[in-house]
Image (tube, rainbow, N blue to C red):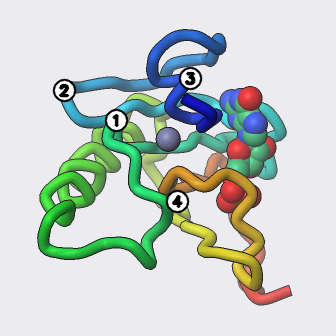
Amino acid sequence: MSCLFCKIIAGEIPSAKVYEDEKVYAFKDISPQAPVHVLVVPREHIESADKIDATNSATVAAVFEAIPKVATACGLTCGYRVITNIGEDGCQSVKHIHFHILGGEKLPENMGN
Ligand code: 5GP
Ligand code: ZN
């Protein structure tokens, strides 16, 4: 298995766990871009949001059901941002679908560049 996030989910690489359930794992980003920066990933390997289809959308739904729980666990009572990067132009560096949860402060309005 060569996927970094599959290794993290399997416990082969250590991570700072924030939340987990049967289908989802959430852990602190190693290089935080905000006071709270957590990555929420499905245990099932899906390359990116561009690969979501009818065979795996229930897994993605489980991620979105987990997101409010992750936010609560992180104390994000005033809102937060959810981002997923896709492919080359989206600057996706890890090819296992993941959702960045950013918060803990008022975030910049400009999301483009
Ligand atoms: P992407 O650029 O693919 O959207 O996001 C990948 C994220 O994974 C980056 O924010 C990066 O800091 C984070 N990351 C990369 N390697 C590791 C790691 O080994 N552990 C953790 N916790 N985060 C990582
Ligand atoms: Zn993977």
Above-or-below relation of 15 to 100: above
Q: Earlier in the sequence, mark 1 or mark 3?
A: 3
* Camera sees residue 85: yes
Disc 1 versus disc 4: distance between alpha carbons? 23 Å
- Point out the tag, 2 or 4, that comes first from the N-terminus: 2
Q: Nearer the viewer, residue 88 or 33?
A: 88
Q: Which mark is residue 43?
A: 1
Amino acid type indicated by mark 2: Glu
Please name the amino acid that badge 1 sits on: Arg
Q: Position of residue 37 (x, y in %)?
A: 66, 43
Q: Is residue 105 above or below residue 87?
A: above
Q: Are marks 2 and 1 in contact (CB under 8 Å)?
A: yes
Q: Given this view, does label 1 or label 4 mark the residue nearer the observer?
A: 1
As measured in the structure, the alpha-carbon distance from the residue carrying label 2 to the one carrying label 1 is 8 Å
Could you tell which of marks 1 and 4 lies nearer the N-terminus? 1
| Residues at circles 2 and 3 in contact by the CB criterion of under 8 Å | no
- Do labels 1 and 4 touch, CB within 8 Å? no
Residue picked out by circle 3: 8
What is the quadrant of residue 88 in the picture? bottom right
Which element type, helix, strand or loop, lies under badge 1?
A: loop
Side of 13 where 54 appears, left or right: left
Q: Earlier in the sequence, mark 2 or mark 1?
A: 2
Q: Which residue is mark 4?
A: 80
**Residue 84 placed where, x, y %?**
55, 67
Q: Position of residue 76 (x, y in %)?
A: 48, 45
Ligand 1, by image quadrant, is: top right
Ligand 1 lies under 8 Å from the Cβ of mark 3? yes
Q: Residues within 10 Å of mark 1 (few under 14, many from 20)?
A: many
Q: CA distance from mark 1 to mark 3?
A: 10 Å
Image x and y of residue 54, in percent: 13, 73
> Which numbered marker is on residue 22?
2
